[in-house]
Image: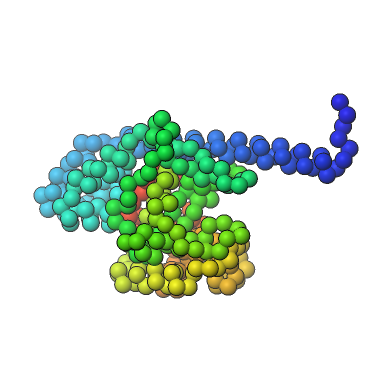
Amino acid sequence: MKKIKNKPARFLIILLAFVLAFKVFDFTAGELTDRKAYEDAAAADYGAFQEVLSKAQSGEILSEEDYGVIFSQSGLGKPAADKLISENNTEKIEFYRDYFLLDKDCECIREGIFACHERITDAEKNPIENPYFADLQDGDILITLSIHSLGWRHGHAAVVIDAEAGKTVQATMWGEKTSIGSVREWLEYPLVAVLRAKNTDEYTRKEIARYAGENLVGLRYSFAAGLVGSGSSAGTQCAHLVELAYNEYAIDIDSNGGKIITPYQILKSENLETVQVYGNIKEL
């Protein structure tokens, strides 16, 4: 067999082999991670969950441990649980628990050469959609880790600017400017979280949403946003866009204080509380 003497051709073959290897790894890593999320969730204790709901129905004040039981078995954080309890709608909490522990799977959808997003399916691989979020408000942050490229689970982030209409502001990919998105797009992800700023009133959160809708649409995409310059004129990426909206109101959502912020860092911020999750995203 003759050796390939043409250097450009040899480089192209090596590059294609590299891309193919990473594509195989990318699919495998995604499938294993998300399947484990639902297997872990299925180990929840239903008896403890019923005891907590009985306390809520009788008007007792729930402890942090009680809220932990609700969260581990339904994905509902304290804000969402309190909302449903205040509406005397513990049946809806049961509904979210039943869905949270439903036997689910996922499939990877390729977007371009490197990127892949995961879509939730039933056990027979039929696409399904998560129920609409229990307590979504203007200014809330959406985070998913169901998007990965070359084995890196970088995820995606967006700001909710109109919860009632289901609208977000987001930066999607290089070559596309920031735009208005739909909350419904997020309901197909296996791993997704709704986060809310702690110790902020509804007015402030609505102002964050208003600012994002009026000032952060139409910006150019930049992977290095935050590394060179910090304002929107330097470009933005999904997590950086969310940070821009919150920085305007002096709320720090970056958990490690670095120059470049990622969805994972927002997910770990101590200044945000979890409203709801699908999959055990907080454990990843």
Decide which of 123, 198 is in the foreground and name it: 123
**Considering only vertical position in the picture, is 35 above or below 87?**
above
Q: How far across and how far down the image is residue 194, in percent? A: 37, 55
In this rendering, the count of numbered labels is 0
Q: How far across and how far down the image is residue 54, in percent? A: 14, 44
Q: Residue at x 58, y 73 (%)?
A: 233
Q: Residue at x 47, y 48 (%)?
A: 145
Q: Residue at x 32, y 50 (%)?
A: 132
Q: How far across and how far down the image is residue 221, in percent? A: 58, 63
Q: Residue at x 32, y 46 (%)?
A: 131
Q: Is residue 57 left or right of residue 276?
A: left
Decide which of 241, 170 is in the foreground and name it: 170
| Residue 128 visible at all | yes
Q: Is residue 164 left or right of residue 148?
A: left
Q: Is residue 102 left or right of residue 20?
A: left
**Considering only vertical position in the picture, is 103 above or below 216?**
above
